[in-house]
Image: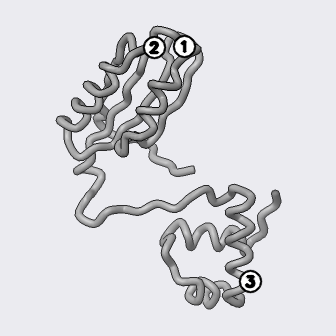
Amino acid sequence: MKLDAIDHQILDELTADARIPLATLATRLGLSRQSVRQRIDRLEGQKVISGYTIRRAGHSSADTVRAVMLVYRKDRMRGADVTSVIAKIPEVVDCAILSGEIDLMVRLEADSHERINQIWSQISTLPGVQNINTCFVLSALVQRSN
């Protein structure tokens, strides 16, 4: 997959404003709307663009409580019941199966410490969960989106 300068400009513009109208984007790039649409479709098809996100008005990163839960399961090979429940929790922004001692790493973003505690209670009572270590994020040094 090879990206040219126009592809990079499209990515830059969409990163700054994912809701930019095609007509505005086409004007900025000196292309037709159809050409821009085809390029965006290609970038999505090649998974260069894997999704779009929103930032809620009135919610700054200072308002968000972030935590990482390290989940230990009783049986590493039969954990689909645990992961299927975790996948349905809206505050879960990332869940990864890990090698080594820890089975799952779950990253959370919630509106309060109380909500993190509720999620901890929900996950800790699942059959198959042996233990959970929870770490609250104090500050973020690097934040990148894919």
Q: Dot 1 corresponds to which residue?
A: 76
Residue type, numbered disc 3:
Ser
Work out which quarter of the rendered image holds the N terminus and state it: bottom right
- CB-based contact (under 8 Å), mark 3 and mark 2: no
Q: Dot 3 corresponds to which residue?
A: 35
Task: Bin the neighbour count of mark 2 within 10 Å (Cα to Cα): few under 14, some 14-19, many 20 and up.
Answer: many
Circle 3 or circle 1, nearest the eye? 1
Residue 120 in picture, x, y percent from top left: 28, 26
**Mark 3 or 2, nearer chain start:** 3
Residue 15 in picture, x, y percent from top left: 53, 66
Which image quadrant for residue 131?
A: top left
Residue 113 in picture, x, y percent from top left: 20, 36
Q: Nearer the viewer, residue 120 or 10?
A: 120
41 on left or right of 75: right
Residue type, numbered disc 1:
Arg
Q: Dot 2 corresponds to which residue?
A: 73
User: Which residue ends up furthest to the left in the rendered image?
Assistant: 114
Q: Residue at x 51, y 70 (%)?
A: 18
Colour basis = one colour
Give the spatial CA distance, label 3 vs label 1.
Answer: 48 Å
Q: In the picture shown, does residue 141 fall above or below 60?
A: above
Give the spatial CA distance, label 3 vs label 2.
Answer: 50 Å
145 on left or right of 1: left
